[in-house]
Image (spheres, rainbow, N blue to C red):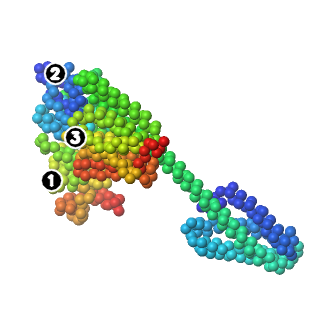
């Protein structure tokens, strides 16, 4: 689907280095149909600018302070076309190739830029491929999440996984409980589980993942199930298989 | 494991030494009279083999009473006691053997004549045993020195390995590609700045390659490498990167291993300041006092930012190189609070004049 000529394609440039933004600005200058709506120097600004300007296309640097390009991708609507920009990141590059997301390598050459832009124009309005899979694939092997990013309106919260008490599945969302507060995020519980270190987090139930260190005791409840009691008094259901996993982890630790 | 029992050739050599010793025994017994050469040979050949085997046990006694740590009294008592007990038992077995042999007509009365010589056998047994003790102590010392040599070799191989790894890790691909990107941006907006940056990058790469071959360089040379690195990063990060340097002139002639500080400064920039949206500062300081050179690399950082593996590796690399080069006379301390990350090094102050 090509945009009508009179309607410009709204673009955001997100990179923490001014010179890197400058290159993209120059390359885009040859395209009158492209309109740069804003430039952002970090991920927070990017999430805010996306909500504010509703761009069609995003040039997104991968390596940025606090919120990386992948974090931003998780927090924005999936129908924005994204072209990733990176200097060198073997895992990210592989992930882009596997999931057919456009990317540019620094330094950016004009030909490569034009090709990526053409492809992106065709894709505007299409949904991005599964963000969760892409983000998982871009992570170096054997490395688990250190934090989870959550967006509430334009406010972005970083939850370090060490502060996470438990995760609860709620329809299409997961509720992340940390320090008594609950944060909702549109994600499946299975993909949250895949990013968490299995030595610290246990899927105790179809709908619950618990931070192992928060569990104070386990009480029997009903015929086949149990309750996990957390330090703050929260009670979470434990299924039979969940109990087996908890026990296995407990045995490992002893 | 017993060194003589594990290798057949060693055991052969050991037994071969016992052939002249056996002959000596035969000679002694014959000289003291009453026993003929044939009789003495028949009697003593198997006994010599038996005692040679028995003396192998001295190795275990020697291992259990190391020369250095056991007192003289303990050494004497242990070995003399072992020598007497073993020799006495040996002489008794010899008596039983002589008794058995004397039943044959050609060796009649050998058992009676043997008794007269048993004292000589016990005494020579004790002496032979003690010679063995000496021999085994020498063997243990040789083994220990060989093991020490192997250890030294291992450490030096390890040191070289660490050094090589450190050097290979020097040019970070991120740094290289990002710098090239900055240059490409500057070519249109500020061509002379682009040229300047090309030269900085070329100098940095040339110095990295060249310095790696030397074993030590003056601090001033390392600093000029760092200045180029930081000048390049400054172009990328702009006002986000602030730098201060407090290095007294007299420290600049001190020798350090090349590229020791570079990974620390690179860490400070890429994992400290680059993670701060508003940037931060980097402080380089040095001090020479009481024959020590102390160097401090300090940077702003975000304690909550994801810890990066490369940081850990860079620091570990520097630590390994210091250990390999200075052993215990150099130290590295890493401290971090909520906003500052500090690495301080302390090494022996070696100046150029002393070295050359």
Residue identified by numbered label 1: A181
- The numbered disc on residue B279 is 3
Residue occupying the point 32% across, 58% down: A249
Q: Do residues under tags 3 and 2 come within 8 Å of each other at their CB atoms?
A: no
Q: Residue at x 69, y 66 (%)?
A: B131
Instruction: Indicate the secondary structure of the residue bearing disc 1.
Output: strand
Disc 2 target residue = A33
Q: Quadrant of residue A232?
A: bottom left
Q: Is residue A141 left or right of residue A209?
A: right
Q: Position of residue B80 (x, y in %)?
A: 66, 74
| Disc 2: host chain | A
Q: Secondary structure at mark 2?
A: loop
Image: B111 above or below B233: below
Q: Does B284 sit above or below residue B124?
A: above
Give how far apart the Cα atoms at labels 3 and 2 are.
35 Å
In front here: A1 or B196? B196
Q: Nearer the viewer, residue A243 or B70?
A: B70
Residue at image position (77%, 75%) is B120
Q: Quadrant of residue A154?
A: top left
Give coordinates of residue B20: x percent, y percent. Answer: 78, 62
Where is residue A204 drawn, in percent x and y?
A: 25, 56
Q: Is B104 or B346 nearer to us in this picture?
A: B346
Residue B96 image point, x, y percent: 77, 76
The 10 Å Cα crowd at callout 3, few under 14, some 14 to 19, many 20 or more, is some
């Amino acid at each position: 689907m090509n945009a009508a000529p009179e309607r410009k394609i709204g673009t955001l440039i997100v990179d923490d280095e001014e010179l890197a933004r400058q290159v993209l600005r120059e390359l885009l200058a040859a395209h009158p149909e492209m309109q740069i709506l804003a430039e952002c120097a970090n991920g927070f600004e990017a999430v805010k600018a996306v909500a504010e300007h509703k761009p069609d296309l995003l040039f997104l640097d991968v390596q940025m302070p606090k919120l990386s390009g992948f974090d931003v991708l998780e927090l924005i609507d999936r129908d924005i076309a994204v072209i990733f920009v990176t200097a060198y990141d073997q895992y990210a590059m592989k992930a882009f190739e596997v999931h057919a997301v456009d990317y540019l390598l620094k330094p950016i050459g004009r030909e490569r830029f034009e090709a990526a832009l053409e492809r992106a124009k065709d894709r505007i309005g299409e949904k991005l491929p599964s963000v969760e899979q892409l983000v998982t694939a871009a992570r170096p092997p054997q490395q688990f999440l250190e934090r989870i990013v959550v967006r509430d309106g334009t406010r972005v919260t970083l939850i370090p996984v060490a502060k996470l008490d438990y995760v609860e599945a709620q329809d299409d969302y997961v509720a992340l409980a940390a320090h008594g507060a609950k944060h909702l995020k549109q994600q499946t519980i299975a993909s949250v589980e895949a990013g968490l270190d299995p030595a610290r987090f246990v899927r105790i139930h179809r709908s619950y993942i618990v931070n192992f260190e928060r569990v104070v005791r386990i009480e029997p409840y009903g015929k086949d199930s149990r309750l996990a009691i957390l330090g703050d008094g929260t009670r979470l259901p434990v299924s039979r298989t969940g109990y087996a996993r908890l026990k296995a982890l407990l045995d490992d630790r002893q | 494991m017993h060194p003589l029992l594990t290798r057949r050739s060693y055991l052969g050599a050991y037994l071969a030494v016992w052939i002249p010793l056996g002959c000596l025994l035969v000679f002694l017994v014959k000289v003291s009279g009453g026993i003929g050469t044939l009789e003495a040979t028949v009697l003593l050949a198997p006994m010599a083999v038996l005692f040679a085997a028995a003396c192998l046990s001295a190795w275990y006694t020697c291992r259990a009473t190391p020369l250095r740590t056991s007192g003289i009294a303990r050494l004497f008592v242990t070995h003399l006691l072992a020598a007497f007990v073993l020799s006495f038992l040996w002489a008794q077995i010899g008596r039983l053997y002589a008794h058995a042999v004397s039943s044959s007509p050609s060796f009649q009365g050998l058992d009676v004549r043997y008794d007269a010589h048993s004292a000589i056998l016990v005494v020579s047994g004790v002496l032979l045993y003690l010679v063995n003790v000496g021999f085994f102590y020498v063997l243990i010392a040789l083994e220990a020195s060989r093991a020490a040599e192997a250890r030294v070799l291992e450490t030096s191989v390890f040191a070289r390995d660490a050094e090589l790894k450190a050097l290979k890790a020097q040019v970070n691909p991120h740094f290289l590609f990002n710098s090239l990107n900055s240059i490409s941006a500057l070519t249109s907006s500020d061509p002379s700045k682009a040229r300047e940056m090309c030269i900085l990058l070329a100098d940095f790469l040339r110095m990295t390659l060249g310095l790696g071959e030397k074993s030590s360089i003056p601090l001033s040379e390392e600093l000029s490498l760092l200045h180029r690195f930081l000048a390049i990063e400054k172009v990328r990060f702009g006002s986000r990167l602030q730098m201060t340097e407090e290095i007294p002139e007299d420290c600049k002639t001190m020798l350090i291993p090349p590229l020791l500080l570079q990974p620390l400064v690179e860490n400070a920039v890429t994992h400290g300041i680059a993670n701060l949206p508003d940037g931060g500062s980097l402080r380089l300081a040095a001090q020479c006092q009481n024959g020590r050179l102390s160097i401090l690399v300090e940077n702003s950082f975000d304690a909550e930012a994801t810890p990066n593996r490369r940081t850990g590796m860079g620091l570990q690399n520097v630590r390994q190189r210091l250990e390999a080069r200075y052993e215990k006379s150099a130290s590295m301390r890493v401290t971090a609070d909520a906003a500052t990350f500090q690495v301080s090094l302390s090494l022996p102050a070696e100046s150029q004049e002393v070295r050359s």
